[in-house]
Amino acid sequence: MPLANRIIKRLYPAVMILLLSTVLLVGCSGKDPLDGPKDIMEVYRATCLNCHGTDLQGLVGPSSDLRNVGKRLTAAQIERQIMEGGEIIMPAYKDKLSKDEIDGLVDWLASKK
């Protein structure tokens, strides 16, 4: 058997273990963006997910990206946006969500920094 084939045969198990370990670590290391209180995550999924996405990445333009919204906006600005709606597309939710639901969304989103 040629030297190259013997080296490949010996290294193959180690390479496969390394590859599998890397895939598992990458898959497990990602933090779930929807990591807030269960009841608030249910509100997000029911009212926000269609425009803001499953990873908070935003689906309707850059301003809909919520991954670091706490850096861009204060809690008061986030609350106003939820209550009164956005400039173009986002509807107002002051008559659709309870005060507790809005407060929960504001607290959770303000922590996204």
Image: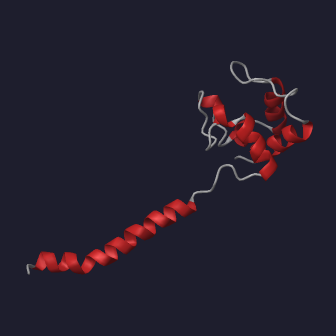
Of 33 and 110, the residue lying toward us? 33
Of 87 and 91, the residue lying toward us? 91
The total of numbered circles placed on residues is 0
Q: Percent position (x, y) of residue 8?
A: 20, 75
> Is 24 above or below relative to 99?
below
Residue that sits furthest to the top in the current view: 88
Of 72 and 23, the residue lying toward us? 23
Q: Could you tell me which residue is drawn at 71 percent across and 35 percent down?
A: 48
Quadrant in which the N terminus appears: bottom left
Of 101 and 77, the residue lying toward us? 101
Q: Percent position (x, y) of residue 10?
A: 24, 81
> Is 112 above or below relative to 86?
below
Residue that sits furthest to the left in the current view: 2
Residue that sits furthest to the right in the current view: 99
Snapshot colouring: secondary structure
Q: Is residue 92 left or right of residue 14?
A: right
Q: Could you tell me which residue is drawn at 44 percent across and 66 percent down?
A: 22
Q: Percent position (x, y) of residue 51?
A: 65, 31
Q: Could you tell me which residue is drawn at 64 percent across and 29 percent down?
A: 63
Location of residue 47 by image quarter: top right
Location of residue 73 by image quarter: top right
Q: Percent position (x, y) of residue 71?
A: 71, 41
Q: Could you tell me which residue is drawn at 75 percent across and 51 percent down?
A: 36
Location of residue 32 by image quarter: bottom right
